[in-house]
Image: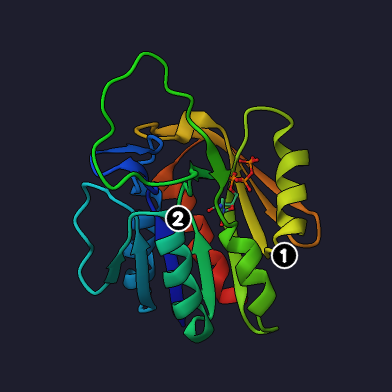
Amino acid sequence: MKVLITAGPTREYLDPVRFISNPSTGKMGYIIAKECIKRGYEVILISGPTHINVPSGVKCINVETAEEMKQAVLRCFPQADVLIMSAAVSDWRPVKRAKEKIKRKKVWNLKLVPNPDILKEVAKIKKAHQKVIGFALETEEIIKNAKKKLKEKNMDIIVADTPAFFGEGKEADVVFIYRDGTTESFKKITKEAVAKHLISLLRFF
Ligand code: CTP
């Protein structure tokens, strides 16, 4: 089984020294990668900037921006059996990246444009045998919103969680939602336990 995993945040640059990002540590994706290696799967990890060492046996492609992540995913996906999209992709980027450092000024009206939705791009090239697993970070109406994402992005499983899990968060209430609409809920589960459960499901694919 060839598993393609994305992890970590993306950085969207304003100028050479400043960027917009989020507190994702990349931990979830790296734990999933390790779990896949343990089971003898082949792993390609596409990672935004993190402080985590790449688990041995994992081929890692480092990226910074959402656009770079999109290019890497679309290049690798045709050879993969499963895509696990755990990256916290920045939905917005500055309308332009200044070549030189922007000087201090009184008010800076920042203009942002939407980044591509990587999973929506993947949905266009997904073949019947390929499976896609995503994550949904929600602050309200968790199951309803996650189910909508699963459908819109043509996923097979979506793992819905709350900001309790984001960044350094250790435990959270998590719901696994499957393509047929069934759900499985876990209270105060760790990232390690989420990874174990998720990877145990791959054998049914
Ligand atoms: N995702 C993606 N491309 C983006 C944004 C998100 O592929 N530009 C993926 C994430 O990796 C995740 C899933 O889509 O697996 C859901 O991400 P999430 O941030 O929860 O939702 P969004 O689709 O960005 O919607 P919103 O931020 O409006 O809730």
Q: Earlier in the sequence, mark 1 or mark 2?
A: 2
Toward the viewer: 93 or 160? 93
Color style of the picture = rainbow
The one nearer the camera, 50 or 98, is 98
Rendering coords of residue 201 (x, y %): 57, 66
Q: Residue at x 70, y 35 (%)?
A: 142
Residue at left offset 45%, top offset 52%? 87
Mark 2 vs ligand 1: CB below 8 Å: yes
112 over 72 or under it: above or below: above
Is there any visible trace of residue 187 in the rendered image?
A: no
Q: Which residue is the site of mark 1?
A: 154
Taking the image as drawn, is residue 67 in sight? yes
Q: Is residue 38 above or below residue 95?
A: below
Q: Nearer the viewer, mark 1 or mark 2?
A: 2
Check disc 1 and give the amino acid type: Asn
* Residue 72 percent location from the top left of the image: 42, 71
Identify the secondary structure beneath mark 1: loop
> x, y percentage for residue 120?
65, 63
Q: Which residue is mark 2?
A: 66
